[in-house]
Every structure is written in C-alpha cells, then in structure tokens.
Image (tube, grey):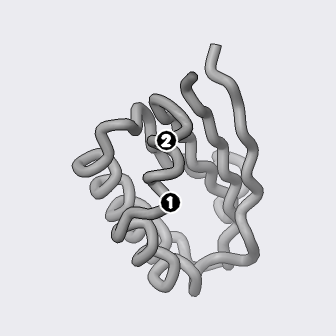
Amino acid sequence: MAVGVLATIKIKEGTNEAFEAVAKELMAAVHANEPGNKVYQFCKSKSDPTTYVVMEIYADQAAFEAHGKTDHFRAIGPKMGPSMAGRPEIQFFDPV
C-alpha cells in the first residue's frame, strides 16, 4: 500500500534562500535516485514565508523506509539544520 507523508517545516526568518537551495538539492536527489518515490515536493506557504511543507508519496512502506536510509537524505540534515526553527511536524496518510 502506498504511503503519504506531509512534513511541515518552520524556518528562521531570513533564511529562505539558503533553505530553498538545500530543498531543491534534496528534491533532485530523491527524483534521480528513489524509484519508489512518486511525489517529493517542497512548497512555501503563501501566508507565512517561514512555513514550508514537503509533500511525499511512496509506492509502499519499504520505499518510505529506504528514503530515510539514503546517503542524500542523511547528508541533508547538516545543510538544512541552520535554517530550521525547530523539528518538522510529520503526518502520515493513506493515499486514496
């Protein structure tokens, strides 16, 4: 069964450019290297420029678990961390 994930990320004011550069790097790596990923898209809130969401859909639980073990995912934390204003809020969904 497919797995849907919505991660809400708050960033520090004034770090949008740095955060978005890293987000684009991660999106490109996921799209190029994770065949079990169907959607991986960062989006910025129109009403709050310090709020982003990552919309993710994986073919199955194994693909979702593999994502967290990839070198590109593990390497992104130190790059993204300085912009983040706290831990992401993660929600899981069953795609319809």
Horizontal placement of 3 versus 68: left or right? right
x 62%, y 50%: residue: 53
CA gap between label 1 and label 2 equals: 10 Å
Q: Please tell me the numbered disc located at residue 68.
A: 1
Picture coordinates of residue 21, whole percent (x, y): 38, 69
The amino acid type, in three-letter code, at marker 1 is Gly
In front: 72, or 81? 72
x 76%, y 57%: residue: 89
In front: 11, or 57? 57
In front: 42, or 46? 42
N-terminal label among 1 and 2: 2
Q: Quadrant of the N terminus?
A: top right
Within 10 Å of disc 2 (Cα), the crowding (few <14, some 14-19, many 20+) is few
x 63%, y 41%: residue: 5
Query: Can you identify the residue that label 2 sits on?
Result: 62
Vertical order, 81 against 56 (above or below): below
x 29%, y 54%: residue: 28
Quarter of the rendering containing residue 49: bottom right
Where disc 1 sits, the SS reads helix
Picture coordinates of residue 51, whole percent (x, y): 68, 58
Picture coordinates of residue 69, whole percent (x, y): 45, 63
Horizontal placement of 70 versus 11: left or right? left
- Of badges 1 and 2, nearer the viewer stands 2
The amino acid type, in three-letter code, at marker 2 is Ala
Quarter of the rendering containing residue 93: top right
Vertical order, 91 against 14 (above or below): above
Horizontal placement of 89 versus 42: left or right? right
Picture coordinates of residue 85, whole percent (x, y): 72, 77
